[in-house]
Amino acid sequence: MPSPQGEGRRDSCRSPFGNNGRVKDPAASAVLRRPEGASFAALRHAEFRAYFVTGMLTMMADNIEHVISYWVIFEAFRSPALAGFAVISHWLPHLVFGMAIGALADRHDCRRILQVSQLVFIGVSVAWAVLFLTGTLQTWHAMILLVAHGCAGALRGPASQLIIHDIVGRGDLQSAVRLNSTGRQLGSLFGPAVGGVLLVIVGPAVGLAINCLAYLPMVVWLQRTPFSGHLHATAGPGQARFGLGDAMRTLREVAGNRAVVLMVALSGITSLLVGNAFQAQMPEFASDFTVARGEITYSALLAASAAGAALGGVLIESSPFLRQPRAQSAIVLAALWSLAIGVFAVAPGYPVALGALFVAGFLSLAFGSIAQTLVQLEAPPDRRGRVVGLFGMSSQGLRVGSGVTVGILGSFIGIHASLGLSAAVLLVLCLGLLALADRGTPAVPRGSA
């Protein structure tokens, strides 16, 4: 039998499959393959690299659709209320169905769940393209497609996290969560740029038809990967079906974990008050700057936040100090994020707005990845999907509130005032949460894989 050292050397240059085709324990092999705290550790897994690339393409397609559809909706209706509905419809499925979808991911093959999500995304893009091409877009069309897009996004959340955990195991999970967030932000960075170019060169209808192609690589990869989200966990078929009693049991387990409670609360208040509602309102923000009254400069505002997040992901993954996940660190970073959003809301000029969004993107990636890592590492293995779904309800589902605080309120007092007010309230709440945080929260969470 080969020594552990020899096994580690061989595993470092091949895929995580044994000679008999069975998947090795990723948590154990991760420890053998790399020194503790190695930078970009998750990218040493071949299947994670494939997921990283296909996930980035999916997020790019998602943002291309947002850029094109939001622009056409703004031009056609010029309604802050409809833009607010875009935010509400996008995140409401996460709030209503978060734990149920997490339970679905606990019980069923996550590959098939993700494939269904991808196909819904493709269907929505095709529908937008047809409506734009025929010039028949009406408000109710837009509302239905926005809701369908939101449902597809909610379906994707827990399943994607379980597959990531399955691929890399506990040893490299922190790196995988950060890199997954970075890949999503890279997609958000390239998406607006590509969407703006497609708007100018081929128009919205053809642009969205082309956009469908970016969803396909993940569909193909999901068909061939062996990782179902359950190969190395006790979750899966045979669990009790999700219901009220099951949900209450999950909540009781979570209530006993201080780190999880703090991160769920933090993600909840940031999502409820600000979230990403300002992105749906970006056409109006852009129109307030003379230099930004056009498709390309509007796309640059959307891309600024993603550029900051992408840089943040690389810097955090490269720094041993910044990689340590602490609840207090996440809260402080979230407070700084609220300040950056406030600066953007009152920015006197286009360059200041771009800079504020860039900084906000960096901070968003930083506190978001810490929160996600703490929650996923602390979740009970057999209920991980449910706990991730609960976190999704808070971090994404509560963004429906930002559609009200920024979008609906903005239709009465102006979007600059509504965003600035929301950011100020968030800052106060973050400081209050920081006062409640346990200064003894461990830097590296405890728990089983």
Image (cartoon, rainbow, N blue to C red):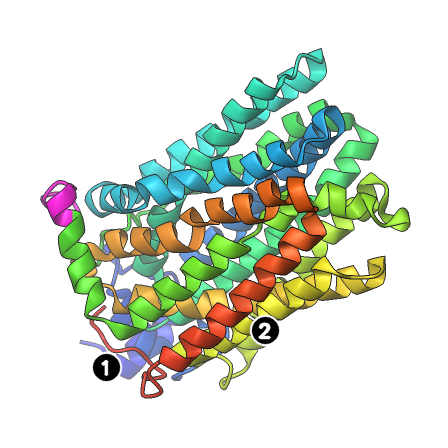
**Residue 220 versus residue 383 in the image, above or below:** above
Q: Between tags 2 and 1, which lies in front?
A: 2
Q: In percent of the image, x 36 and y 87: which residue is there?
A: 439
Q: Earlier in the sequence, mark 2 or mark 1?
A: 1
Horizontal side of residue 294 vs 336, given as left or right: right
Amino acid bearing label 1? Ser
Q: Which mark is residue 274?
A: none
Residue situated in front as seen by the camera: 301 or 248: 248
Q: In percent of the image, x 61 and y 34: which residue is there?
A: 81
Amino acid bearing label 2? Leu
Could you tell me which secondary element the residue under label 2 belongs to? helix
- Residue 169: image quadrant is bottom left
Q: Which residues are magenta?
A: 233-246
Q: Neighbour class for label 1 at 10 Å: few (<14), some, many (≥20)?
A: few
**Residue 358 versus residue 210 in the image, above or below:** below
Residue situated in front as seen by the camera: 67 or 422: 422
Could you tell me which secondary element the residue under label 1 belongs to? loop
Q: CA distance from mark 2 to mark 1?
A: 49 Å
The residue pinned by badge 2 equals 336
The residue pinned by badge 1 equals 3
Horizontal side of residue 302 vs 94, given as left or right: right
Q: Residue furthest right?
A: 290
